[in-house]
């Protein structure tokens, strides 16, 4: 057993206690009343990184929630890796569904229960612990390492595009390792090849100037809810394909290698339906469920509202109706271009008698895909295979991690998701948890991957 492995084992209880302290900070980035808690979490991360032996640690302003940066750059011409994670969390509602208070971490049956335990405090703690073990036992890291931990991922990282552009030289690296993500199963690792981007559109339909009596005016004045229903129905054809003109124009097709990798991921239809509670599968024809979920774009109606919402009947012809739409995007789609095309479609689909506006939502993110032959994948895959005893699957992620596309565009650096949560650990839900097995494995895996990446000549060439 190496010295750093012994260090990790000997300090395991201390690390758990420190993680519990971290989890007690209610760093909910979406709620203004918790802005000071996000700042407190940044201060906790700053102090913890310094204690680990990381250098040049500082909290950097972004115009929104901050970034904590640090580095260790004494490995000469060896590659430089940027380690990414986030210390903000989702809100905790509905509170009454939590078995224990969300910011009072509890250890039950080998699981750490708390908001942020999986996403992402538990995962982002792992590389800090691993680097401490290496620094305290060997006096150095095997390659150059930079650390980038943010406090606004759960609200879409709105200030990060500008921040990364302004700090491009400071953040320059050969590869990014992301501690935000997870593995496929307890006994099956994976490598994430893509994350989808995001675009959102808000639709407002104005009919009469105020709510009208549906008996007096019904049938003589256009109903904005009826108009909205027609608009929303026009967004897809009967088979589920998006009917917006030009929506698929920039979609990058799957390569044969990518298609083969997806085909190796088994799909259990019954389990999938049981997990979702859905009656049947549905989606764009000509693609498998995994292809639809990972490598095809979507347009979803997230919410519809207008008119009377209370108990019983109120016979009105409402004055307004609203819908919120979101698109998950894939390489090489552009969020601004897609938003514009959806808005134009909504305008064309509007029936007479109503005024329709379509405006861009707050969140937007570019999609991301890593080349199948990137040398870092082989290195990360070899570590995961040794840790789990199984060859990693190559999969996609249907969700969005905004910084992946930002790092690729601004730093010309690919991101490998290297995190150890599991899909059933209730991210964003009540009773979120993180398995102790992932906590232990992840620390070892980070030390191993840094050692092996140090000898990867391909990283310096970007391959």
Image (cartoon, grey):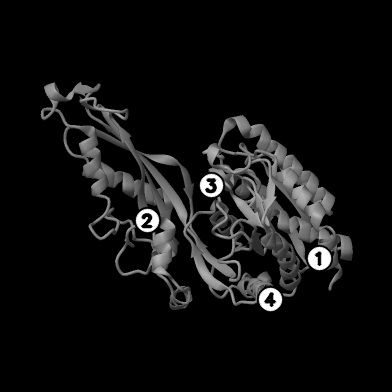
Of the image marks 4 and 2, the number of the one nearer the N terminus: 2
Mark 3–mark 2 Cα distance, whole angstroms, equals 23 Å
Please state, as top left, top right, bottom left or bottom right, where the N terminus lies in the image: bottom right
Does residue 72 lie above or below 375 as drawn? above
**SS class, disc 4:** helix
Check if mark 1's residue and mark 4's residue have beta carbons within 8 Å.
no
Q: Secondary structure at mark 3?
A: loop
Residue at 31% x, 63% y is 284
Looking at the rendered structure, which numbered label has been put on residue 429?
3
Picture coordinates of residue 276, whole percent (x, y)? 41, 56
Res. 220 image quadrant: top left
**Residue under numbered circle 1:** 75
Where residue 65 is drawn, which disc sits there? none
Residue depicted at x 54% and y 47%: 428
The answer to the question of whether label 3 and label 4 lie on touching residues, with beta carbons closer than 8 A, is no
- 23 with respect to 57 (left or right): left
Q: In front of the other: label 1 or label 4?
A: 4
320, 56: nearer the viewer = 320
Q: Is residue 444 above or below residue 208?
A: below
- Residue 139 appears in the picture as rendered: no
Q: Which residue is mark 2?
A: 298
Identify the mark nearer the N-term, 1 or 4: 1
Q: Which residue is denoted by mark 4 in the rendering?
A: 386
**CA neighbours of label 4 inside 10 A, class few (<14), some (14 to 19), many (20+):** few
Mark 2 vs mark 1, foreground winner is 2
């Amino acid at each position: 057993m190496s010295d750093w492995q012994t260090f990790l084992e000997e300090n395991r209880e201390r690390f758990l206690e420190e993680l519990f302290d971290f989890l007690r900070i209610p760093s909910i980035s979406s709620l203004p009343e918790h802005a000071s808690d996000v700042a407190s979490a940044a201060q906790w991360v700053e102090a913890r990184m310094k204690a680990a032996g990381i250098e040049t640690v500082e909290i950097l302003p972004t115009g929104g929630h901050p970034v904590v940066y640090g580095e260790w750059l004494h490995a000469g011409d060896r590659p430089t890796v940027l380690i990414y994670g986030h210390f903000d969390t989702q809100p905790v509602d509905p509170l009454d569904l939590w078995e224990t208070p969300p910011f009072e971490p509890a250890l039950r049956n080998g699981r750490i229960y708390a908001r942020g335990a999986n996403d992402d405090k538990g995962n982002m703690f792992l590389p800090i612990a691993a680097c401490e073990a290496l620094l305290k036992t060997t006096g150095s890291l095997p390659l150059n390492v930079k650390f980038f931990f943010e406090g606004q991922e759960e609200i879409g990282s709105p200030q990060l595009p500008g921040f990364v552009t302004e700090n491009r030289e400071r953040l320059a690296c050969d590869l990014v390792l992301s501690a935000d993500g997870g593995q496929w199963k307890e006994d099956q690792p994976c490598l994430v090849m893509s994350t989808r981007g995001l675009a959102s559109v808000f639709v407002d339909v104005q009919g009469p100037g105020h709510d009208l009596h549906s008996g007096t005016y019904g049938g003589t004045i256009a109903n904005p809810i009826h108009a909205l229903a027609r608009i929303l129905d026009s967004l897809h054809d009967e088979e589920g394909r998006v009917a917006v003109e030009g929506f698929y124009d920039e979609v990058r097709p799957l390569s044969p290698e990518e298609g083969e990798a997806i085909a190796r991921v088994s799909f259990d239809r019954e389990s999938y339906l049981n997990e979702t509670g859905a009656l049947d599968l549905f989606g764009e024809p000509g693609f498998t469920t995994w292809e639809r979920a990972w490598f095809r774009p979507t347009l979803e109606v997230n919410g519809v509202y207008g008119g009377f919402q209370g108990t019983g009947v109120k016979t009105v012809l409402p004055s307004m109706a609203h819908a919120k739409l979101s698109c998950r995007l894939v390489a090489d789609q552009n969020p601004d271009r897609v938003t514009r095309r959806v808005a134009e479609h909504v305008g064309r689909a509007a029936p007479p008698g109503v005024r329709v506006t379509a405006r861009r939502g707050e969140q937007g993110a570019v999609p991301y895909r890593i080349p199948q032959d990137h040398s870092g994948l082989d290195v990360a895959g070899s570590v995961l295979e040794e840790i789990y005893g199984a060859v990693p699957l190559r999969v996609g992620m249907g969700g969005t991690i905004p910084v992946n596309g930002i790092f690729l565009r601004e730093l010309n650096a690919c991101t490998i998701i290297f995190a150890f949560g599991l899909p059933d650990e209730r991210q964003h839900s009540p009773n979120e948890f993180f398995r102790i097995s992932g906590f232990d494995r992840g620390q070892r895996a980070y030390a191993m991957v840094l050692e092996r990446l140090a000898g990867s000549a391909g990283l310096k060439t970007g391959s």
